């Protein structure tokens, strides 16, 4: 039997609660530290082994906490999986959120003309590249997100609703304004997907570009190079998308 079969009950007091609290000290700070360590260990384990292959026993061991802490803090393995996805969403939104909110409000106001749409699209792609390539945790996010893309679980909704879906809708809206097409036009939607995909491949396919160019990671110089290429792609996609 695997360690998933006999899950400890969630406890709010008694011996189980005291044991968990004793792991890192007492109070609220220790509880948050336990959650943080579990999410970090689970991010790596789920990304490397998948949901089924990542055992809670391994995750707890890597986090340096008691196995009972997983059901105590997250209700079980499913809850921990969703918490990892929410952690990624929170990190991305913390860096992209203000710009996304500004663009969303502008689009809803109806005051975005073609030129403003172009400026906003360049800004959004540039900022997204900074986050996806420059965030210290981004390489750890990639395997987790890729697994959810290839074989979506219910947790995919957390990622899609949290930032992926909204980003795609906003990019589609900006492309539509920039090219004079409808936001519901299938070609415009596909172009938005192609544009975002070109950004994502620089993270997911990092090993290829590093070997081809002799890079050792994404530092400021490398990120600026990628941003320049992506901005050229934005310009080309907008030009090709304009009705003839």
Image (tube, rainbow, N blue to C red):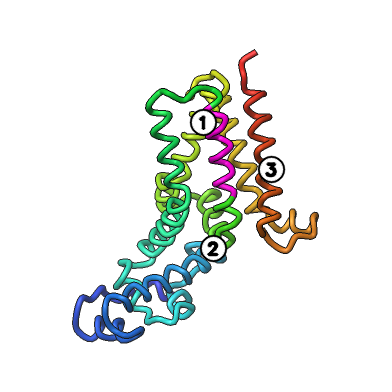
Magenta-colored stretch includes residue 180: no
**Residue at coordinates 19% horizontally, 84% vertically from top-left?**
14
**Judging from the image, what secondary structure is the residue with disc 2 in?**
loop
Answer whether residue 186 is visible to the viewer in this image. Answer: no
Q: Give me the C-alpha separation between circle 3 and circle 1.
A: 21 Å
Magenta-colored stretch includes residue 126: yes
Is 176 positioned to the left or the right of 216 in the image? left
Pointer 2 local density, CA inside 10 Å: few below 14, some 14–19, many at least 20: some
The residue pinned by badge 1 equals: 172
The residue pinned by badge 3 equals: 228
**Residue at coordinates 66% horizontally, 24% vertically from top-left?**
239
Residue stretch rendered in magenta on the structure: 116-129
List x then y, in percent, for residue 43.
Answer: 49, 65
The residue lying toward the viewer, choosing from 22 and 100, is 100
The residue pinned by badge 2 equals: 137
Which-is-in-front pick, marks 3 and 1? 3
**Judging from the image, what secondary structure is the residue with disc 1 in?**
helix
């Amino acid at each position: 039997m695997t360690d998933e079969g006999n899950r400890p009950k969630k406890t709010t007091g008694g011996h189980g609660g005291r044991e968990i609290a004793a792991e890192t000290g007492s109070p609220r700070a220790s509880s948050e530290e336990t959650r943080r360590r579990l999410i970090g260990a689970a991010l790596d384990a789920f990304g490397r082994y998948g949901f089924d292959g990542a055992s809670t026993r391994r995750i707890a061991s890597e986090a340096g906490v008691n196995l009972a802490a997983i059901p105590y803090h997250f209700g079980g393995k499913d809850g921990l999986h969703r918490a990892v996805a929410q952690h990624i969403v929170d990190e991305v939104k913390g860096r992209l959120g203000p710009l996304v909110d500004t663009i969303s409000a502008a689009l809803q106001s109806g005051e975005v003309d073609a030129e403003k749409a172009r400026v906003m699209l360049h800004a959004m792609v540039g900022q997204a590249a900074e986050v996806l390539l420059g965030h210290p945790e981004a390489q750890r996010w990639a395997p987790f997100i890729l697994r959810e893309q290839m074989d979506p679980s219910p947790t995919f909704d957390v990622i899609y609703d949290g930032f992926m879906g909204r980003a795609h809708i906003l990019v589609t809206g900006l492309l539509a304004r920039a090219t004079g097409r409808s936001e519901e036009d299938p070609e415009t939607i596909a172009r938005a997907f192609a544009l975002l995909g070109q950004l994502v491949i620089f993270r997911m396919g990092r090993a290829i570009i590093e070997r081809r160019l002799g890079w050792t990671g994404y530092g400021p110089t490398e990120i600026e190079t990628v941003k320049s290429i992506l901005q050229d792609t934005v310009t080309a996609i907008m030009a090709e998308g304009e009705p003839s």
